[in-house]
Image (cartoon, rainbow, N blue to C red):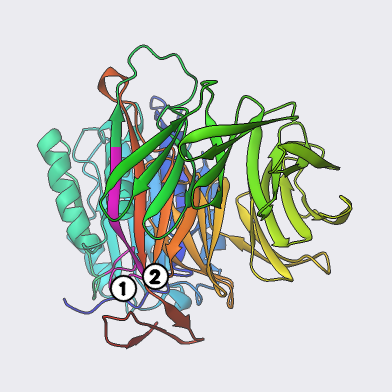
Amino acid sequence: MSEKYDINYWNPGKVLVFADGQFERESKLKYIQSDIGLISRVFGSLNYKIEVFIDLTSDQLRTKILQETREDFTDYSCLVCFFSTHGDLHYINDKNGQNFSILEILLRFLEVESLSDKPKFFFIDAGHASMNMEITSESLFELDSHSKNDILIEYTSTTNYESDSNNEGSLFIQKLCKSIGTNKEGDILEILSTLNSQLMEKNPRQLASFDSSLKKKFFFQNNSNYFFKCAKTISIRIANKDSKDFYNLNEISCLKVIDQNLIAIGSCDRTIKIWDLKNSKWIKSLYNSTKTRIKCIQIIDHRTIASGCFDNTVKIWKNNQCVGILHDHKEWIFCLELIDENLLASGSGDKTIKIWDLKNHKPTQTLNGHGDFVYCLRLISQDVLASGSGDKTVKIWNCINGLCIRTLSEHTGRVLCVEIINQDVLASGSADRTIKIWNWKKSTCLWTLSGHADNIFCLKLIDKETLASGSGDRTIKVWNLKYFKCIQILFGHSEDVLCLDKIDNKTLVSGGKDGEKITFNFFDECLWLINYLKFLIYPKNYTFWTKTNRHRSRKF
């Protein structure tokens, strides 16, 4: 089986989660919300549309399945169904412990014309299987005789034993989601073969198995032609056994590219580190004498850096020394933006934006108007500045007279980042998990990009038609601004992606809150360099190339 299913990775499919966690005749199925959250996070990051149904009776379950089978799946490439419940032979249990036929579910979806010749996955995770959950040969014959198959059914239980779990939920769900989220090489059959063997090694009584009539290979991620790949990871371990700091001291709060060889990185360990890309080493560290975390940095010139701190000050660093401290804000500094060689803007938790004279280190203007923290700033032109705030708005300011000239207010959550697309258009990322594309001059939202499963912390324009976004869902998404589509998802961070910058036209760098707490309170600090291959998008095919690769084109 060498052929692959044709998958539109911009809009790959639909995931239905049916979870019954409360029963009358059986004990409560624990950790059901953890399973639902993990499925939603992983498949949401892959652009799947997700619907969750919890604690349904047989009648309600039948009604929901009928409703779903009446949907038009033409624009989807596949269907994925999860059933987390208890079960008997050929059946899953509803909320009241009543049997509901697995075969009825399968046949309903096999009758959907718009799913014909498309893969359909059914993952049946029975917390307690009173009997063997396998479908008999007679049942499979009925499915095989059906003209529309292409199905895969995975069972996690064997006779009279529970599907194994831990404090974080079903082991099967955890391993499956991890494999789908990180395995970029194996198709689903390879993933399940490996996963089932791992489960059996851990617990010989959990004999997970699957039946499949898939005709081709299926990959949950677009592996054949990756636009990006992770080229390098920089890690540092710092022992902090006795620290009671609320923050992970190695969290990368901010980063800025100085030139193609140097990156400045601000961290919760209260330092700014300069990384030499060419020689792959740290060349200097700038220490914040007030011992507060570095939240934002701005490159003034090749030898001068400004930093915003949680001591309410902006510090100016030159030749490895702090040469000035800007005092006037009443709360933490969240963002900095250079207006010109003599003027610097800062946004603060005191709801103001201040414009500073870098020669005398004094504020020249204070911009008032936001009703909450000012989280982000971007310069549109020398006279026009954009800001995003916890008051859910983007404001446009005249830097000369200090007046707000536009307010953009369609977000439903805090605006955490803004990026300039061109002189008329900007993008904003929010805690409402969307990116909005605005024509700020007309105060009009042109498009809303949805797909992230958590806060959007950072945006970076790659070229005039391509935008990258980093999120609390641990992914970086790459968006085509001509068709307003997500064209790739980058995995690798294990925590929130907090900052992005571009080294050159081929390379992005990202930093985040990486580092699960491990032995002796060590933390990991991760910096990802991602090779960027330039591409063009056409309505029915895509084309991309690099200087070293031949031109290639492939249709969806």
Q: Which mark is residue 209?
A: none
- In magenta stretch: residue 406: no
Vertically, is 460 above or below 200?
below
State if disc 1 and disc 2 touch (CB < 8 Å): yes
Judging by the rendered image, the residue that carries numbered circle 1 is 149
Task: Where is residue 340? Give x, y as percent.
Answer: 68, 56
Report the span colored magenta.
Answer: 218-235
Q: Amino acid at mark 2?
A: Leu
Q: Is residue 446 left or right of residue 171?
A: right
Q: Please name whichever residue, 442 or 380, is drawn nearer the observer in this view of the structure.
A: 380
Q: Amino acid at mark 1?
A: Asn
- In magenta stretch: residue 229: yes
Judging by the rendered image, the residue that carries numbered circle 2 is 110
* Among the two numbered marks 2 and 1 on one chain, the one whose residue lies closer to the N terminus: 2
Vertically, is 462 above or below 60?
below
Q: Is residue 145 left or right of residue 342?
A: left
Q: Is residue 49 left or right of residue 446?
A: left
Vertically, is 275 above or below 226?
above
